[in-house]
Amino acid sequence: TSLYNFQVLKLFCVIECRKYVLGILLIFSIFFWLQFYRNGFGFSGTINVCNWHPLLMTITFTYLFANSILHFRNFRNIKKKKLKKQHLIIHSCIIFFGLIGVWTGLNSNVIAKPPIPKFYSFHSWLGIVTVIMFLSQFASGFVTFFYPKVAVQYKKAIMPYHIFIGTLTFILSIVTSVLGISEKIMFALNQQDNYMPTEGLYLNFVAFLLIFYGVMVVYILIKPEYKRPPKPKDVVTHIANI
């Protein structure tokens, strides 16, 4: 049994390290695309402000989100109470910088000549749903797991739903990002005469990276062997096995 557990943990570490590398590669791929193909970044009042949107959303609702929901598995020897506080901090950063990313996307629609209609695409609709689900999950999780008067049995009962909705929200964020990349590919095709411009080919590659990254994260989440094992040092109010 101990040998099996060692092999499982070893494989988990290998997959997790590759996931980290792939996540960093994904962020740099988005940055390179925006810098090389889309003329870099700007601030409020310039059209290049829109380039912050895909970069910030990739960092927050893809990379940080993935690391946050896997936080308890990655640091299984740290007290769960401390991990929950870190989990909360990471999610707070996602909300802060993610909302800035949403604002840059909306602001660019107004600055564009002519202005681009807001919320006309399925990408934007699904993005709204994803953000609302994330905020709702954050609020309900904060009340349930940080409010001291909530009964332990209620926390244990709500935990499976908390994990399921969190996983679903992450999947939706990946789908939303892929849809956003598809929109950018269509814009690139409309702006150039050749059948498939280099930018379109590059974004197809980035979309594959994004999908593969999401699959790796979900695989780690649903694999029972990769769950954090119960620890005797975990206090009674944090006994739910994440």
Image (cartoon, rainbow, N blue to C red):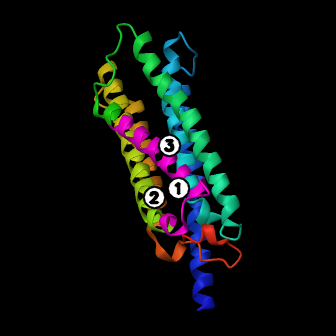
Q: CA distance from mark 1 to mark 3?
A: 22 Å
Stretch of the chain drawn in magenta:
126-155
Q: CA distance from mark 2 to mark 3?
A: 17 Å
Identify the residue at horizontal 71%, vertical 75% (top origin).
233
Q: Which residue is mark 2?
A: 162
The image shows residue 241 at horizontal and vertical percentages of 54, 71
Q: Residues within 10 Å of mark 2 (few under 14, many from 20)?
A: some
Residue 27 appearing in the image: yes
Q: Spot the residue most to the front.
A: 149
Amino acid, disc 1? Thr
Amino acid, disc 2? His
Q: Is residue 188 above or below residue 149?
A: above
Question: Nearer the N terminus, badge 1 or badge 3?
Answer: 3
Q: Main secondary structure of the magenta part?
A: helix
Q: Spot the residue most to the bottom.
A: 1
Q: Which residue is mark 1?
A: 144
Quadrant the C terminus occupies: bottom right
Q: Is residue 74 left or right of residue 51?
A: right
Q: Which residue is mark 3?
A: 61
Question: Nearer the N terminus, badge 2 or badge 3?
Answer: 3
Query: Relative to the observer, which residue lies in front, 29 or 240?
Result: 240
Disc 1 on helix, strand or loop? Answer: helix
Amino acid, disc 3? Phe
Question: Nearer the N terminus, badge 1 or badge 2?
Answer: 1
The image shows residue 5 at horizontal and vertical percentages of 59, 84
Q: Spot the residue most to the top.
A: 113
For the residues labelled 1 and 3, say whether their Cβ atoms are less than 8 Å apart: no
Q: Nearer the viewer, mark 2 or mark 3?
A: 2
Q: Is residue 146 left or right of residue 195?
A: right
Query: Relative to the observer, which residue lies in front, 71 or 210?
Result: 71
Q: Nearer the viewer, mark 1 or mark 3?
A: 1
The image shows residue 120 at horizontal and vertical percentages of 28, 24
